Image (cartoon, rainbow, N blue to C red):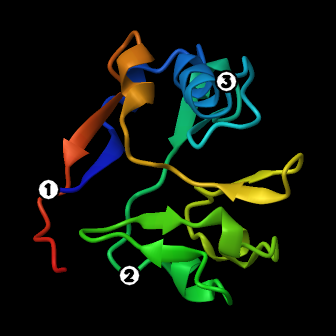
Amino acid sequence: MPHRVSVVGIERCIGCYSCMFACSRLRFNEVGMARSAIQVRSAGGIERGFIVIVCRACIDPPCAKSCPTSALKPRPGGGVILNEDKCTSCKSCYEACIVRAIVWDDERDKPIVCRYCGFCTKFCPHNVIALESIGREILV
């Protein structure tokens, strides 16, 4: 059954960015936040809290539809799988994502998309995010 990372308690987010550090560390073996597939941002001041942006694992992902080389392909059950070798760095996927969940890696000139591994959820000290089963039937 496919999974996705979901925001389950945004009111508990304190903006520690642990999820972003975890993602960046796992994927690029570096300590930083710029190369993370999950993004945490201020909602506009301390009293407004934070927003967490993560791929929603769309069934019919607009990012994949916009890719002229099929570098992004729909994943069975929702979401996408990136084949970086096919990516021409056109940024169509980045512009097509309606929730802005695709992060652009300026250093590699490639998109960073969620792998739905849930590694980031293990580092959230306040259980703001969780890995959940999508509950969609996989059609192969």
Task: State the residue in front, 45 or 101.
Answer: 101
- Taking the image as shown, residue 58 lies to the left or right of residue 65, namely left
Quadrant hosting residue 6: top left
Compared with residue 108, is residue 60 higher up or lower down, i.e. above or below? below
* Residue behind mark 3: 29
Compared with residue 74, is residue 48 higher up or lower down, i.e. above or below? above
What residue lies at 49% left-to-right and 47% top-to-bottom? 54
Residue 95 coordinates in the image, percent (x, y)? 72, 73
What is the quadrant of the N terminus in the image?
bottom left
- In primary-sequence order, the first of circles 3 and 1 is 1
What residue lies at 50% left-to-right and 49% top-to-bottom? 114
Residue 121 coordinates in the image, percent (x, y)? 37, 26
Task: State the residue in front, 106 or 97.
Answer: 106
Tell me, yes or no, if residue 55 can be seen here: yes
* Residue behind mark 1: 1
Q: CA distance from mark 2 to mark 3?
A: 31 Å
Q: Secondary structure at mark 1?
A: loop
Q: Amino acid at mark 2?
A: Asp
Q: CA distance from mark 3 to mark 1?
A: 28 Å
Residue 85 coordinates in the image, percent (x, y)? 69, 68
What residue lies at 62% left-to-right and 59% top-to-bottom? 100
Residue 119 coordinates in the image, percent (x, y)? 41, 28
What residue lies at 16% left-to-right and 79% top-to-bottom? 139
Quadrant hosting residue 76: bottom left
- In primary-sequence order, the first of circles 2 and 3 is 3
- Taking the image as shown, residue 6 lies to the left or right of residue 135, namely right
- In primary-sequence order, the first of circles 2 and 1 is 1
* Residue behind mark 2: 60
Q: CA distance from mark 2 to mark 1?
A: 17 Å
